[in-house]
Structure formats: structure tokens, C-alpha cells
Amino acid sequence: MVSRKKAKGKERKAAKAMKEEEKENSSAAAAQQRELEGALELQMQRLIIDSLPSPCKHGFDPFPEGHTCDCLLKLYFATYYTGSSDPATAVLTAMRAVEDKYPEVLRDSSKMKQILSYFLSVGTDHILNGRDGAARTTVAVIIMFEEFIAFSVQKTQAVLHLQKLMEMLIADDHTLVSFFRKRITCSCLDKKHKEVKSIKKMGYCNNDKCPLPGRKVERSKMLYCTRCSVAYYCSRDCQKAAWSEHREFCKEKAERNAKFEQEMRIRDQNSM
């Protein structure tokens, strides 16, 4: 016959085993519940994401893989990233590579519109994601393309105005955002523009020895060379100081401008 003491011991062991089993079952149930809740939460996140509109392309209509414009851009980027560490030099080198291989594209206004639309979309995304440095380089690319079209294709100007390119590589936030906002078809930069519109727009003095920090000056106060219309300065003193270096360049640009204007007048007369 089992003693009362042993019987109570067995009861305690049985009760303890039951509690442990209940605890394990409870933990397993809790883990299953958490897993179910996690799956439901993930499903809800996917539903929310799927219900959102696709990211704005800012007016860019993507071209298919292998399209001529796609090939041109791949060549441009391959040349740019393997070229000079100086952004301006890298842009010019990449442009020359593109011009050598795809001259017909650069002279096709519809294709160039697509390519510029691509760069505008990329630059806008850079600004929205806080990559202002990359956005400035993208502006330099756009300006280079626009200058080439105006100079070589449309022939509406006598020289390449690379002052714009240099200024955009160091552009203030107001100038940078305004450049893209005026050219895209959406309102994605409206909020950003409100944040930066109080910043004064700055220009770049052409005098290498300009005493101003970064050679930057408020654009509304800048002076420009009336002879060549290309070089800009922060003051009359800087313009005079730079004249010895600017003289030959100015003469060449002025002669080109005069020749261009004469050709334009003859063309207009012949078209009458």
C-alpha cells in the first residue's frame, strides 16, 4: 500500500508536469499567434504598397532596352565614370564620345527631348533624396547637351556658353531647384522650392584671383563683358584685373559673334 507521503509526491509531480505542458502549449500558441500577426501585417503592407501610384517620373517616358537613346546614355555614363575626376572635364569628354558615335541622335530633336527628359527626371530625384552634388553634375550635363544643340544643330548661337556649366557645378540650392522645377511637368519640387526660394541666387566671377569666398557673388549684382557676352564678374575691379588673361579669348568670341550675326542677317534676307 502506497504511503500518504509518496502519494502526495506523485500528485505534486503530476501537477508540475501538467503546468509545464500548459506553459509549452501556451508558448507555442503565442508564437503561432505572433507568426500569424506578422504574416497579416506583411500582407497589409504589400496591399498598401500595391495601392500606391507608381513613383513619379517627372515627365520622363522610359525608352526600351536597346533603344538608340538607351545606347547613347550607356556610352555617356561609361565614358563619364572612367574619365577625369573633374566633373566639367568628365562631362566634356563624355559629350565628345557621344558626338563621335551618335551624331545623328544629337541632331534629332525628338530623341534629344527624350534624353533631356531622362536627365531632368534623374536630377529631380537627386534633389528629392538629398543628393544635391549629383543634381549639380546632372545640370551640367543638361546644359552641355542644350548648348551643343543650340550651337551645332539649331545654330542659334555663335559660341558655347560654358559659364552656365561652371556656375551650375557650384550652384546655390535656390538656383539648383529652380532649374529643374521650371523644366519638369509635375509639381514634385514645389515644396522644396518654397524651402529654398529665400536663398539669394549666386553667380561665379571669372577672375581667377577674385577675393570673394569661392568667387561667388549675388547674381543680380554681376557685371558681364559687353564685347563677348560670355565672361561675368563680381566688380569692375575684377573685370580689369582679369583683362590680360581674358583679352585673347574675348577677341575670338567677339569675332565669332560678329560673323554669326552677319550670317544670320544674310540667311534672313535670303528667306524673304
Image (cartoon, grey):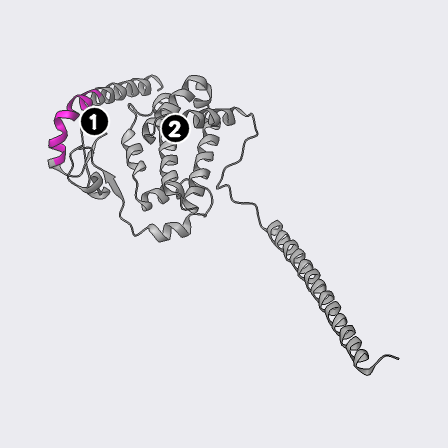
Q: Residues within 10 Å of mark 1 (few under 14, many from 20)?
A: some
Q: Is residue 270 left or right of residue 63?
A: left
Q: Amino acid at mark 1?
A: Cys
The x, y position of residue 175, in whole percent, is: 32, 43
Q: How many marks?
A: 2
Residue at image position (28%, 36%) is 167
Residue pointed to by mark 1:
228
Q: Residue reaching furthest right?
A: 1
Q: Quadrant of the N terminus?
A: bottom right
Residue pointed to by mark 2:
145
Q: Return the residue nearer the eye: 28 or 107.
A: 28
Marks 2/1: CA distance? 22 Å
Magenta part of the chain: 238-252
Quadrant hosting residue 184:
top left
Q: Return the residue nearer the eye: 236 or 155.
A: 236
Quadrant hosting residue 54:
top right
Magenta segment includes 251? yes
- Answer whether residue 154 is visible to the viewer in this image: no
